[in-house]
Image (cartoon, grey):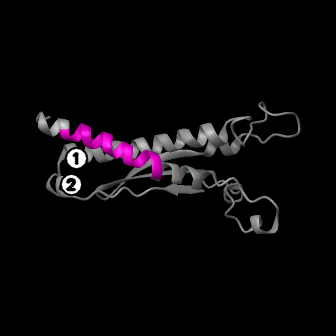
């Protein structure tokens, strides 16, 4: 499973300083922060042992009722440069049963298990609550740096 979030910037300040190194640093900092916060949210809400999380490692669960912890170990975020843009992505490294756990597999239609929708929920949380505030914070930092000629 993969979740991605597109950060679009527009307006006079962005048009004027689009090629500025300070502006690029602010955008990159925002993308990195979103990936880190998304990873943390997945880990604390969905991947930690009960009562908080849904996936348990063998040492954290009762005998005979545990996973090996493979899924939890394979969920991580990355940032990479594509052209002039920095892209962030949180994924499960292609674990075969990832779509089933998320609820997007065709197998979910034939069983009672509908999935946890953890990536979808984290993406919605990032879009609604985190992205606007993260961008505002980094724009404030950008504005202060430009005002002080840094």
Q: Residue at x 19, y 36 (%)?
A: 144
Q: Which of marks 2 and 1 is nearer the N terminus?
A: 2
The quadrant of the picture occupied by the C terminus is: top left
Mark 1 sits on what residue? 23
Kindly give the residue lying farthest to the right in the view shown.
64
Depicted 47 relative to depicted 92: above or below: above
Which is in the foreground here, disc 2 or disc 1?
Answer: 2
Task: Residue under label 2, please give it.
Answer: 14
The answer to whether residue 136 is magenta is: yes
Q: Where is the N terminus found, in terms of image quarters? A: bottom right
Q: Tell me the SS state at disc 2.
A: helix
Q: Do the residues labelled 2 and 1 touch (CB within 8 Å)?
A: yes
In the current view of this chain or complex, which residue is farthest to the top? 59
Depth order, front residue of 68/37:
37
> In screen coordinates, is 114 left or right of 23?
right
How many residues crowd mark 1 within 10 Å: few (<14), some (14–19), many (20+)? many
Mark number for residue 123?
A: none
Residue 6, located in which quarter of the rendered image? Answer: bottom left
Q: How many labels does the image show?
A: 2
**Residue 143 location (% of width, % of height):** 19, 40
Q: What residue is drawn where x is 82% and y is 64%?
A: 111
Q: Residue 53 falls in which quadrant of the image?
A: top right
Q: How far apart are marks 2 and 1 (CA)?
A: 8 Å
Q: Which of 89 and 11 is in front in this view?
A: 11
Q: What stretch is highlighted in magenta?
A: 128-143
Residue at x-position 22% and y-position 41%:
142
Q: Nearer the viewer, residue 52 or 78?
A: 52
Residue 116 rendering spot, x and y as whole percentages: 69, 53
Q: In this view, does 31 lie to the left or right of 59?
A: left
Instruction: Tell me residue 85's x, y (percent).
Output: 32, 55
Q: Is residue 140 above or below residue 118?
A: above
Place of residue 65 in the rendered image (x, y in percent of width and height, measured from the top left) = 85, 40
């Amino acid at each position: 499973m993969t979740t991605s979030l597109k950060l679009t910037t527009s307006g006079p300040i962005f048009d004027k300083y689009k090629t500025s190194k300070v502006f690029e640093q602010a955008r990159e900092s925002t993308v990195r922060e979103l990936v880190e916060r998304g990873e943390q949210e997945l880990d604390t809400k969905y991947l930690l042992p009960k009562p908080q999380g849904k996936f348990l490692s063998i040492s954290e669960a009762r005998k005979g009722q545990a996973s090996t912890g493979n899924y939890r170990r394979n969920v991580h975020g990355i940032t990479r440069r594509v052209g002039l843009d920095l892209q962030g992505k949180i994924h499960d490294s292609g674990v075969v049963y990832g779509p089933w756990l998320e609820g997007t597999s065709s197998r979910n239609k034939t069983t009672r298990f509908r999935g946890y929708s953890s990536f979808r929920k984290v993406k919605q949380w990032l879009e609604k609550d985190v992205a606007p505030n993260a961008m505002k914070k980094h724009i404030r930092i950008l504005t202060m740096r430009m005002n002080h000629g840094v």
